[in-house]
Image (cartoon, helix red, strand yellow):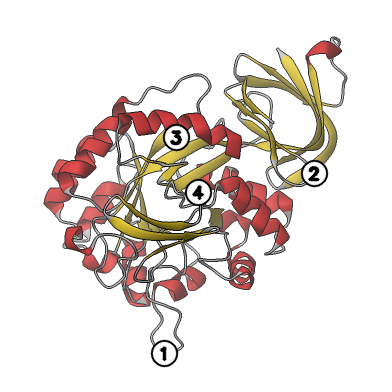
């Protein structure tokens, strides 16, 4: 049993000078009373928030979830230093056999006490558009068929939380309803869909947009594409990469004004190359150029991001003028709601899981708590 004391942010609101009691993995007290034994009290001048939840994350610090079972361990171990207490392991376009191996590894992953928690997986490709592959390997892109759903996805439906796909490339839209009925979140990304395509997909269960504005048909005043649908359709919750490279900060601010904190989620889309020095690399079959937080294929396209989610929260506040209370919500509670995992996570309330991040006055991670355990402390 121990206590944290300081300002807290929860559910989009800030409360000053609160004490949080933690025991057996849960929050058992939130109030203003001082604990009897101050030896187990941690006081911060920063702010205590629900832990960050990265629902679009390929890897971190050199490892990628598609690499091996050991990569799951390494990534989960490192994530708390970035304030991430839960995550979805995200795949990339690959051979079906490699995708199946990834799903099997995710199903068998056993979290150690000091690790961030795996909540499920996010499948990104191969069911995307060859028109907008981004850095995905074009030769492996395919249309989503009823057979793929039956033999690849549904056997692992318990672990699959989100599937990014191109709705215009689906052979039979009844597949949408089949996946949706299993609680799988369908997200449009790497897509050339028109506004009409997206609206039709919404009627069959589409509810999300993957890394909004990137790798999709654009906003156009006569031919509105997927990016326009993200702005127009109230049913859609949008991911955004807040690094200033994938999307201009004023456009992030504009999307926030349109969607609000309830329909916008901050993601890292980190491809595992955040710790690389600047230079040229040939990794995982790709020729990459790293410069600061910018990661590109040698022939030009962005190749995912090189930020971590804590950096994204800070960027959203400092550069996009999003209130900290809302940025924290969009990096924690919002993603949990989107995947139906917010019943006992994502809020600082009695009875909720003690998954917390303490940010210092510069919005850098000072401490991370996962399941009540202090797993990182600066």
Distance Cα–Cα, label 1 vs label 3: 44 Å
- Number of numbered callouts drawn: 4
Residue pictured at 61% horizontal, 13% vertical:
24
Distance Cα–Cα, label 3 vs label 4: 12 Å
Q: Residues within 10 Å of mark 1 (few under 14, many from 20)?
A: few
Q: To which residue does mark 1 refer?
A: 222
Camera-side residue of 280 and 10: 280
* Above or below, 191 relative to 58: below
The kind of secondary structure element at disc 1 is loop
Distance Cα–Cα, label 1 vs label 2: 46 Å
What label sits on residue 361 in the rendered view? 2
The kind of secondary structure element at disc 3 is helix
Q: Quadrant of residue 319?
A: bottom right
| Disc nearer the start of the sequence (3/2) | 3
What label sits on residue 75 in the rendered view? 3
Residue 283 visible in image: yes
The kind of secondary structure element at disc 4 is loop
Pinpoint residue 159: horizontal percent, then vertical percent.
Answer: 33, 35
Cβ–Cβ under 8 Å for marks 4 and 1: no
Residue pictured at 73% horizontal, 15% vertical:
2
| Disc nearer the start of the sequence (4/2) | 4
| Disc nearer the start of the sequence (1/3) | 3
* Above or below, 98 relative to 94: above
Q: Quadrant of residue 245?
A: bottom right
| Disc nearer the start of the sequence (1/2) | 1
Determine the residue located farthest toward the front in the rendered image: 279
Pinpoint residue 228: horizontal percent, then vertical percent.
Answer: 46, 76
Q: To which residue does mark 4 refer?
A: 274
């Amino acid at each position: 049993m121990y206590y944290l004391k300081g300002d807290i942010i929860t559910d989009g609101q800030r409360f000053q000078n609160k004490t949080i009691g933690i025991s057996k993995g849960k929050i058992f007290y939130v109030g203003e009373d001082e604990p009897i034994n101050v030896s187990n009290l941690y006081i911060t001048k920063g702010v205590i928030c629900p832990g960050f939840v990265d629902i679009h994350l390929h890897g971190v610090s050199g490892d990628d979830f598609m690499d091996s079972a050991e990569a799951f361990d390494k990534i989960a171990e490192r994530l708390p230093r970035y304030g991430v207490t839960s995550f979805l392991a995200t795949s990339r376009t690959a051979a079906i056999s490699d995708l199946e191996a990834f799903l099997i590894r995710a199903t068998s992953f056993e979290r150690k006490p000091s690790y961030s928690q795996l909540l499920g997986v996010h499948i990104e490709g191969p069911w995307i558009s060859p028109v907008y592959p981004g850095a995905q390997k074009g030769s492996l892109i395919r249309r989503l068929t009823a057979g793929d759903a039956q033999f690849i996805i549904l056997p692992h439906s318990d672990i699959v939380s989100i599937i990014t796909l191109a709705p215009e490339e689906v052979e039979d839209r009844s597949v949408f309803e089949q996946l949706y009925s299993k609680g799988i979140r369908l997200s449009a990304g790497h897509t050339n869909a028109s506004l009409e395509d997206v609206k039709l997909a919404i009627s069959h269960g589409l509810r999300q947009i993957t890394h909004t504005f990137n790798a999709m048909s654009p906003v156009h005043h006569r031919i509105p594409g997927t990016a326009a649908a993200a702005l127009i359709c109230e049913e859609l919750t949008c991911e955004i990469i807040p690094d200033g490279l994938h999307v201009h900060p004023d456009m992030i601010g504009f999307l926030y004004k349109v969607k609000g904190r309830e329909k916008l989620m901050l993601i890292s889309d980190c491809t595992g190359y955040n710790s690389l020095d600047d230079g040229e690399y040939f990794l995982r079959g790709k020729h990459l150029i790293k410069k600061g937080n910018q990661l590109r294929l040698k022939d030009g396209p962005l190749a995912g991001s090189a930020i971590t989610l804590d950096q994204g929260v800070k960027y959203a506040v400092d550069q996009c003028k999003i209130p900290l209370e809302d940025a924290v919500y969009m990096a924690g509670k919002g993603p949990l709601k989107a995947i139906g995992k917010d019943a006992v996570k994502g809020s600082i309330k009695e009875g909720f899981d003690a998954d917390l991040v303490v940010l210092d006055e510069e919005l850098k991670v000072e401490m991370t708590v996962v399941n009540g355990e202090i797993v990182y402390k600066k």
